[in-house]
């Protein structure tokens, strides 16, 4: 299968489908599985980080909807629908929550239209667009019809910024999006890092990146924290995904940080 009427290219691995594969889903192709297997072979436990990232998304939305009183969410880099998507968590707490999902994979759009259905009191919309083009996202009629940009919005950038390669390259995109949102809005983000990896694994990953065998650009704690410049970080600040407000029943004892390798934080725009 190559690019067809849907615009889906099954011969090239896509992050959303590879993520789906790591989560145990079935909405992926051979190229996605091969890419995922190559990465996991060199970095055993990759699925633990993916699972931790999915779990912290739920805790972030719960905090935003419950503690911060947010009723509007702009989720960029949606990925393929699975359990406890942003709107499902938010609308369980406040059924009138409104969510705009954004992704650049046509396959995600097909599934989103079928599965990302809103609770009766709220609204859910999907936009096919790219994080690298924030102006198009912000000007989208679907976004403007769903979200009131005069009221606080939670900007969800969960496991997406590390697909923007280059030191300092992610920050301007985040700034353009935040500049369009009013005071009281939030940024919630997670990001892959090699900070916790053993030296030999960091070197191995750098080699994969240089050879074009990985499309995930890691950032260290300092560069990730810089994304929240000017924002008020919610406790506990920048943390390993498993350590960001873990649920009461969960324990992080014995968690190998090098297998998680995902930073997480939530910040409020003053």
Image (cartoon, rainbow, N blue to C red):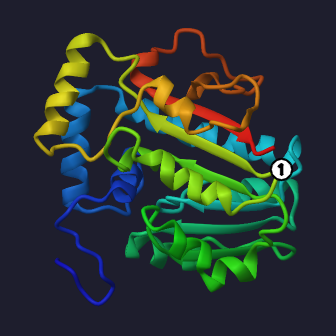
Q: Residue at x 49, y 24 (%)?
A: 221
Q: Residue 192 is drawn in which quadrant? A: top left
Q: Residue at x 78, y 23 (%)?
A: 248
Image vertical order of residue 66 relative to residue 97, above or below? above
Q: How many marks?
A: 1
Q: Residue at x 16, y 35 (%)?
A: 208
The residue at which mark 1 appears reads as 184
182 or 101, nearer to the observer: 182
Image vertical order of residue 249 relative to residue 105, above or below? above
Name the quadrant of the N terminus.
Answer: bottom left
> Could you tell me if residue 10 is visible in this image?
yes
Image vertical order of residue 78 relative to residue 253, above or below? below
Q: Position of residue 204 (x, y in %)?
A: 17, 24
Q: Position of residue 45 (x, y in %)?
A: 35, 27
Q: Residues within 10 Å of mark 1 (few under 14, many from 20)?
A: some
> Could you tell me if residue 84 is visible in this image?
no
255 or 25, nearer to the observer: 255
Q: Position of residue 144 (x, y in %)?
A: 71, 79
Q: Residue furthest bottom?
A: 5
27 or 67, nearer to the observer: 67
66 lies left or right of 159: right
91 lies left or right of 69: left
254 lies left or right of 23: right
Q: Residue furthest left?
A: 211
Image vertical order of residue 1 relative to residue 152, above or below? below
Callout 1: SS: loop
75 lies left or right of 18: right
Q: Position of residue 159 (x, y in %)?
A: 48, 45
Name the quadrant of the C terminus.
Answer: top right
């Amino acid at each position: 299968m190559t690019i067809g009427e849907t615009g889906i290219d099954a011969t090239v691995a896509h992050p959303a489908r590879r993520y789906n594969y790591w989560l145990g889903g079935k909405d992926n192709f051979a190229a996605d599985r091969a890419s995922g297997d190559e990465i996991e072979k060199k970095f055993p436990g990759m699925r633990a980080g993916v699972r931790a990232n999915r779990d912290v998304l739920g805790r972030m939305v719960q905090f935003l909807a419950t503690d911060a009183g947010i009723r509007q969410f702009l989720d960029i880099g949606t990925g393929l629908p699975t359990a406890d998507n942003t709107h499902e968590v938010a609308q369980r707490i406040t059924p009138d929550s409104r969510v705009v999902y954004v992704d650049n994979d046509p396959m995600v759009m097909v599934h989103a239209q079928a599965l990302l259905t809103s609770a009766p009191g709220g609204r859910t919309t999907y936009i096919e667009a790219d994080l690298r083009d924030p102006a198009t996202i912000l000007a989208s009629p679907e976004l403007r019809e769903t979200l009131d940009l005069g009221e606080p919005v939670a900007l969800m950038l969960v496991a997406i910024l590390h697909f923007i390669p280059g030191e300092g390259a992610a920050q301007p995109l985040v700034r353009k999006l935040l500049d369009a949102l009013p005071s009281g809005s939030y940024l919630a983000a997670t990001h892959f890092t090699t900070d916790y990896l053993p030296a030999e694994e960091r070197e191995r990953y750098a080699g994969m990146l240089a050879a074009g065998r990985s499309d995930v650009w890691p950032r260290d704690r300092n560069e990730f924290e810089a994304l929240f410049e000017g924002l008020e970080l919610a406790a506990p600040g920048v943390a390993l995904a498993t350590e960001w407000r873990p649920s009461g029943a969960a324990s992080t004892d014995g968690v190998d940080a090098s297998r998680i390798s995902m930073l997480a934080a939530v910040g409020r725009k003053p």
